[in-house]
């Protein structure tokens, strides 16, 4: 029998403070560090640990090498009707995409729809977070981002497109917004990272090794596989067109021409906001969204669930008790390893026990 899994609960405010302090120690301004930390903790609270604090060590390393700019000169370079273009200057992706959605919402308030293309962002984390900005403002939010090759095009054995994510958030009247947040690959790379850190095998169908063969070893995975075969790879390619070609900053073609990887793999993103009031009876639309919680037809093998119940499409309501982290989870292992290298006065025992906080993170 496997040993009992020891779980810890970290109050979200403590974890956000901890993450913010790490970013500040790496040279990020406090307001930007707080915004970045908040987006990561949100992912953990929603149960998407692959896009939560597990990512911090990688971000810190990119800050040190300059791949992420800790003091970017972000600016809106163009506004024309519904369209805006944001130059992000290699900003933390979460900060850049939050600004892009703010601009899209502002455009939508003027002309009922806003589209902000963000050029030269970096990894943005869980893009559903930014789609919810629009939903919380009473609008529909759509977010996409494009990065370098890490996923095979359908039928290929090497990376030819990325696992470009897509998120759609739809507001409701008496319930949290509905949210779809998905990768165009069968699984996000963060889940492979988690399995690698935990020493677990991965299911067949997640990806291929360097020889283009199916693998269950996360250490050997070299290429992700597309969600739904040609559907996932085709959608990923079109997201590259919408995010990258429109702002004159293509990613996939130059990367493939360079042998599959660029020295400076900066990303692009798009934030879209749609004002529902333009369709007429906004309250009726929001009321219909409330009905998204009606029970789906029940199968004898599965419990009842509402139609917004995921795994990728679900209510945007996060966990309320805090972030649950296993004792030997990838999130805890990676962040504690970072603490041995990061020059910051934080207590390493930042994990709080289920029955009480044993050691909060303090600067």
Image: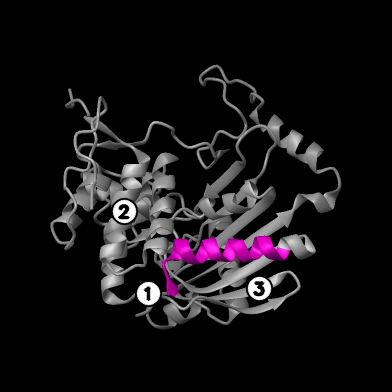
Image position of 99 (left or right of 43): right
The image's colour scheme reads: one colour
Q: Residue at x 52, y 78 (%)?
A: 250
The structure residue drawn at horizontal position 27% and vertical position 43%, both measured from the top left corner, is 201
Q: Are marks 2 and 1 in contact (CB under 8 Å)?
A: no
Residue 64, above or below 322:
below
Q: How many marks?
A: 3
Q: Which residues are magenta?
A: 90-107
Residue 53, relative to residue 74: is it above or below?
above
Determine which residue is flagged by label 3: 84
* Label 3 to label 1: alpha-carbon separation: 22 Å
The answer to the question of whether label 2 and label 3 lie on touching residues, with beta carbons closer than 8 A, is no
* Label 2 sits on residue: 19
Residue 70 point in image, percent of width and height: 36, 72
Q: Nearer the viewer, residue 82 or 109?
A: 109
Res. 248 mark: none
Q: Quadrant of residue 75?
A: bottom right
Main SS of the magenta segment? helix
Residue mark closest to the camera, 2 vs 3? 2
Q: Residue at x 77, y 60 (%)?
A: 112
* 155 lies left or right of 104: left
x, y (%) of residue 123?
42, 64
- Could you tell me if residue 236 is visible in this image? no
Which comes before the other along the chain, label 3 or label 1? 1
For disc 1, the marked residue is 69
């Amino acid at each position: 029998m496997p040993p009992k899994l020891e779980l810890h609960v970290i109050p979200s405010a403590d974890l956000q403070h901890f993450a913010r302090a790490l970013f500040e120690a790496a040279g990020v301004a406090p307001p930007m560090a707080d915004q970045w930390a908040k987006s990561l903790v949100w992912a953990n609270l929603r149960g998407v640990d692959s896009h939560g604090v597990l990512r911090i060590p990688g971000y810190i390393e990119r800050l040190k090498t300059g791949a992420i700019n800790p003091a970017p000169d972000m600016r809106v370079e163009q506004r024309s009707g519904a369209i805006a273009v944001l130059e992000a200057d290699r900003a933390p992706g979460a900060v850049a995409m939050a600004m892009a959605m703010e601009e899209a919402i502002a455009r939508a308030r003027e002309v009922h729809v806003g589209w902000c293309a963000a050029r030269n962002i970096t990894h943005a984390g869980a893009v559903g977070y930014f789609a919810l900005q629009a939903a919380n403002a009473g609008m529909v939010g759509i977010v996409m981002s494009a990065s370098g090759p890490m996923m095979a095009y359908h039928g290929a054995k090497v990376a030819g497109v990325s696992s470009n994510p897509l998120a759609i958030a739809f507001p409701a009247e008496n319930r949290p917004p509905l949210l779809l947040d998905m990768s165009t690959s069968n699984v996000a790379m963060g889940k492979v990272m988690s399995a690698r850190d935990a020493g677990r095998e991965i299911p067949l169908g997640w990806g291929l090794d360097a020889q283009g063969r199916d693998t269950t070893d996360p250490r050997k995975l070299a290429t992700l596989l597309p969600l739904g075969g040609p559907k996932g790879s085709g959608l990923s390619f079109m997201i590259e067109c919408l995010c990258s070609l429109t702002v004159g900053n293509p990613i996939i073609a130059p990367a493939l021409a360079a042998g599959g990887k660029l020295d400076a793999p900066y990303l692009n993103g798009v934030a879209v906001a749609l004002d529902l009031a333009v369709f007429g009876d906004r309250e009726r639309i929001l009321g219909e969204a409330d009905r998204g919680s009606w029970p789906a037809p029940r199968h004898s093998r599965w419990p009842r669930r509402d139609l917004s119940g995921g795994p990728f499409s679900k209510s945007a309501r996060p966990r309320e008790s805090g972030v649950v982290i296993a004792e030997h989870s990838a999130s805890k292992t990676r962040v504690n390893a970072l603490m041995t290298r990061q020059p910051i006065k934080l207590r390493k025992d930042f994990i709080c026990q289920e029955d009480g906080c044993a050691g909060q993170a303090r600067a």
